[in-house]
Image (cartoon, rainbow, N blue to C red):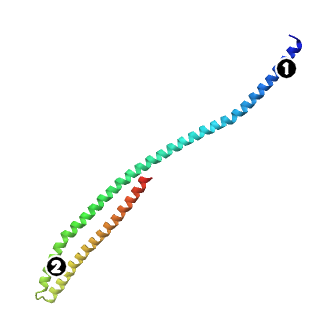
Amino acid sequence: MSNDSVAELEAKLREADKKYRKLEREHTALLRPTRVVEEMAENSKTMLMGSQQELQGEIEERRATEIELGKLIEEIDIARQSRETFLSILTQQLEAPLKGALGMLEIIASRPLDRTQKDLLTLAVTSVQTMQALLRSAESISETHRDKDLGDETLRQMLSAKTQKD
């Protein structure tokens, strides 16, 4: 081999080496954005996993709250039913004796009485009539509560249906 061919080969080798280094720099420059994108993707994945865990926690909390609300609603319904039963029994148990007392007072009123007896009789009749009015008021309040309870039940059903859709 001649000196010229060795020199030419060395020149070609240097040229090839320059091209290799240039390609290597370009390759490294291309890899940098890829690494950034990979890091961003990893960060996004981590954030999404965290968000998913937060949402799962909120869902579990909401389910627990719904269960607790359901128990409270059942307790309220039992209390309302107890109130209704109590008022119904109270009204029935007091109405008959009051009617009997009023009937007896009417019989007494049909007989001759002096002024003091008439005053006492009027007071007794007024007292019985007041008690009857109070019982009617209790019945009216009970009916009002029953109507309100029906409205509450309708609202509860609507909320339940909405919750189940969500």
What numbered label is drawn on residue 78?
none
- Which secondary structure lies at badge 2? helix
Kindly identify the amino acid type of the residue bearing the numbered disc 2. Answer: Leu
Residues 75 and 127: in front is 75
Q: Residues within 10 Å of mark 1 (few under 14, many from 20)?
A: few
Image quadrant of residue 36?
top right
Image quadrant of residue 25?
top right
Name the residue: 77% across, 25% down: 20
Q: Residues within 10 Å of mark 2 (few under 14, many from 20)?
A: some
Left/right of residue 54 with respect to residue 29 in the rendered view = left
Tell us which disc is closer to us: 2 or 1.
1
27 shown above or below 79: above
What numbered label is drawn on residue 11?
1
The percent coordinates of residue 161 (x first, y second) are 40, 56
The percent coordinates of residue 90 (x first, y second) are 22, 67
The percent coordinates of residue 115 (x first, y second) are 16, 89
Compare marks 2 and 1 and give the one earlier in the sequence: 1
Kindly identify the amino acid type of the residue bearing the numbered disc 1. Answer: Ala
Left/right of residue 97 with respect to residue 84 in the rendered view = left
The residue tagged 2 is 102
Name the residue: 12% across, 86% down: 110
20 shown above or below 119: above
- Which secondary structure lies at badge 1? helix
Q: What residue occupies the far left of the structure in this picture?
A: 111
Residues 121 and 48: in front is 48
Name the residue: 72% across, 31% down: 28
Q: Which image quarter holds the N terminus?
A: top right
Left/right of residue 99 with respect to residue 32 in the rendered view = left
Name the residue: 56% across, 39% down: 46
